[in-house]
Amino acid sequence: MRSFALLPIGASALLLLLLPGTALAAGAVEGNWVNPHGSVVVTTGACHNALCGWVRWADATATTDAADAGVAHLAGTELLRDYHARGPGRWAGYVYVPDRGRSFYSTIEQLDANRLKISGCLLRGWLCKSQIWTRQQG
């Protein structure tokens, strides 16, 4: 079984990265992001005054793992939920892990224009597991 984690950025984000002390808006991470295994692509964007992310594509293994946990259609599933800014290049919200059938407290840290560090935690910030997601090119 594989675990999922998640998110994107553009030219305007690069400009913001160059300006000291500027908080990046949620729009800076909107786009398509690929997990470290290349098994899931998540599209991030605004939803209900927050940042969210939905599965755009998943390989056969990820789809099967999710189905085994009761997620009939992985594509379209909202994995990143209710993320709000917590400082420059940082957001906090909840990540849904389909193969576990649970949501966990989560943080997203923008490392640069093409990489996000997504962490899922058991005890609201403690006992966390992180992955680096990269922006899908093209």
Image (cartoon, helix red, strand yellow):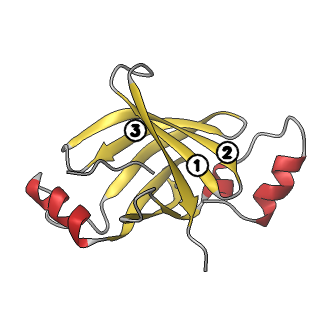
Q: Residue furthest right?
A: 19
| Label 1–label 2 contact, CB within 8 A | yes
The residue positioned 34% from the left and 50% from the top of the image is 4
The residue beneath circle 3 is 94
Disc 1 to disc 2, C-alpha distance: 6 Å
Q: Which residue is mark 1?
A: 116
Q: Amino acid at mark 3?
A: Tyr
Q: Are marks 2 and 3 in contact (CB under 8 Å)?
A: no
Query: According to the image, label 2 marks what residue?
Result: 111
Residue 91 badge: none
Residue 110 position in % (x across, y down): 65, 45
**Which residue is pictured at 52% across the width and 54% down the height?**
133
Q: Judge whether 23 appears above or below 58 on screen.
A: above
Question: Which image quadrant is residue 108 in?
Answer: top right
Three-letter code for the amino acid on which mark 1 is drawn: Leu
Residue type highlighted by circle 2:
Leu
Classify mark 3: residues with Cα within 10 Å, few (<14), some (14-19) or many (20+). Answer: many
- Quadrant in the picture for the C terminus: bottom right
Residue 84 vs 6, above or below: the answer is above
* Mark nearer the N terminus (3 vs 1): 3
The answer to which of marks 1 and 2 sits earlier in the sequence is 2
Position of 50 compared to 68: left or right?
right
Q: Are marks 3 and 1 in contact (CB under 8 Å)?
A: no
Quarter residue 21 falls in? top right
Q: Tell me the element at label 2.
A: strand
State the residue at coordinates (58%, 49%): 116
Looking at marks 2 and 3 on the same chain, the residue that comes earlier in the sequence is marked by: 3
Residue 62 in picture, x, y percent from top left: 25, 62
